Image (tube, rainbow, N blue to C red):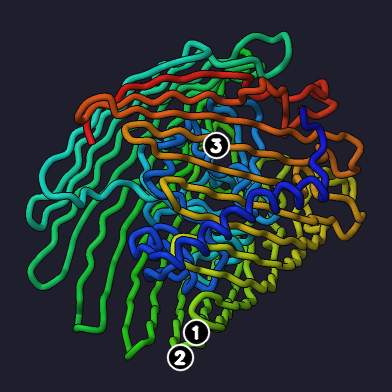
Amino acid sequence: MITTFSRRQGLAALCLGVAPLASAADTVTAESGSADSQQELNSLVVTATLTPRTADQSLASVTVLDEADLRRQDPKDITDMLRAQPGVDVTSNGGFGKTSNVNIRGAGGESTLLLIDGIRLRSATAGSPTWQFLEPRMFERVEVVRGPRGSLYGADAVGGVVQLFTREGEAEGAHPSITAGGGSFGTERYSASLSGRADDTRYAFSASHLSTDGTEIKSGDGDKGYDNTTGFVRLSQGFDNGSEVGLLGLRTRGNTEYVGGNIDYGQQVAGVYGELPVTERWTSRVTLSEARDESEDDANGSLTHFDTVTHSARWENTLIVGDHDLTAGAEYSQDKIDSSSDYNEDSRDNAALFAQALLDFSPLNLQAGMRFDDNEAFGEEVTGHLGISYALDGVHTLRASYGTAFRAPTFNELYFPNYGNDALDPERSRTTELGLRAQFGQGFWDLSVYQTEIKDMIATTLRNGRFAPFNVNQARIRGAELATGAEVNDWSLRAALTYTDPEDRNTGNQLVRRATRSLRLDADRALGDWTLGGSFIAQNHRYNDTDNNERLPGFGLVNLRAGWQFAPLWSTRLTLENVLDKEYATARASAFQGGWDYLNPGRAAFLSVTFGE
């Protein structure tokens, strides 16, 4: 059992994991270097630059989880895929629909921006997305961009951006799929989808349902259940002149139990868009969208509700000038809340202008971007980003970047009755990064080091006789990340090692609930009609309090999986999670609540059968 993951252990494990990957990749390069496999490991990335770029051209630290990754691991929670990816840390108040946060590069959960097909989703009252209610089977791709992206997306992209992409329906004809399964803790899971393309019309429909008795969150308090029902639709129509219109909608609803009550929740994103090639080199796109986060909380018979909705309009223009891409646009959004609590303000709007230049002077590439935000609640903010990369040879690319970002105060921090402080300023950050990536044949490795300085951090404290949020803290976060992978001889191999030093500059203490070291290894093997694989995830200790007195031990998890294509269009999948039955927690209740650990699920097995492609 691993209770502490030391620096020496991490480096040793990384060397063991990376060495065979690099060796295997070099061997494949010398022999053949398949273009298809190379593309898999040098995926196109949209989130980092707004326009498609391969990972080595994006001038950013990126991680892409494609459809094959998602289907092989078949996670019950999207955070299971994100945990211990390079620079990513996940905390949760238990498993199966319990409150979760995704921290990127040591920044808080409110500083990680979540997009679904370009639409921002979060709770405007709490500030962070409700990750725990996202059904992984609705998505076919995940992009994680580490580092500030305020110049492209505005508020809250301090640590980075996670974008989830839904199915588009690219293949000609109709392609149905039905999956049913279940397993430990009384879990049942069903899903169905239909996608395809007819000429210039693309469509995708999906629905899923998960229910479980859950597990104990607090020792001796009984299992806490969870259910989730999700539906999704996406339609698009192309025209002979190259223009396209489309719509998408995703709706999730269900119930989750916690210690002392339960929550009926709902999440929704909806959008319509139109894209027009004004000229051969100028494309214009308009998107209108709505995002909702809704909850009704029954705490021991006391009902409260917090519903937030964000309406947005975004106009984006891309101009191609030779080998260069220029992007400019405008965005307007409005947040509204409806709550059983009487907030001092129940709406705010934000208007923004943004521009970006991607300049290709091969082997030198430049990215420069700037955004101006004018927010009704906290005023004007200007953010910028400058990146440069240089291809040292046909394999290695060196990059450097500097970027600024900000986190907007939440409605709770600004306006919650008898608590909010409407004089708050946004948290502001600046980040410097240096990276080196090697892309060869069927393998890659990517090393990055960075430093982020955050000022005006918002914290709840006693000041002038008032217990409220104030701009009091300063933080410096330093870190290093190493990611590597290879696709060779029917093996798919990945490794990631992360070191983070998230320091509160006022006290010298480690920021709350952040691990400083993590390791993730993923290995899968195709054996005819079978696939076999597993993941190992290790993280060191973290602290639950600002004084660093409440230490939560580190842990190591082993997950195994197997798939079998036993007939045409028929397959089955078995996943074994937390095989060593490790008891671990990434969060602890406050001393006022009793100071108990939020327990995560122990050993579990899940089996599913799928008909379709």
Q: Which circle marks residue 255 in the picture?
A: none
Between the C-alphas of marks 2 and 1, the distance is 6 Å
Q: Report helix, strand or loop for mark 3.
A: helix
Assess disc 2: are there few (<14), some (14-19) or many (≥20) residues with their C-alpha within 10 Å of its C-alpha: few
Residue at coordinates 79% horizontally, 22% vertically from top-left?
Answer: 596
Amino acid type of the residue tagged 3 in the rendering: Asp
Residue at coordinates 34% horizontally, 27% vertically from top-left?
Answer: 564
State yes or no: discs 2 and 1 in contact (Cβ < 8 Å).
Answer: yes
The quadrant holding residue 362 is bottom left
Assess disc 3: are there few (<14), some (14-19) or many (≥20) residues with their C-alpha within 10 Å of its C-alpha: some
Q: Report helix, strand or loop for mark 1.
A: strand
**Quadrant of the rendering where the N terminus is positioned:** top right
Amino acid type of the residue tagged 2 in the rendering: Phe
Q: Report helix, strand or loop for mark 2.
A: strand
Q: Which circle marks residue 80 in the picture?
A: 3
Amino acid type of the residue tagged 1 in the rendering: Asn
State yes or no: discs 3 and 2 in contact (Cβ < 8 Å).
Answer: no
Residue at coordinates 19% horizontally, 29% vertically from top-left?
Answer: 568
Q: Quick check: 366 above or below 406?
A: below
Residue at coordinates 21% horizontally, 55% vertically from top-left?
Answer: 246
Q: Which residue is mark 2?
A: 361
Relative horizontal placement of residue 119, taking residue 87 as reference (left or right): left
Q: Which residue is mark 1?
A: 365
Between the C-alphas of marks 3 and 2, the distance is 40 Å
Residue 353: image x %, image y %?
Answer: 46, 75
Between the C-alphas of marks 3 and 1, the distance is 35 Å
Query: Exactly how many numbered labels are in the figure?
Result: 3
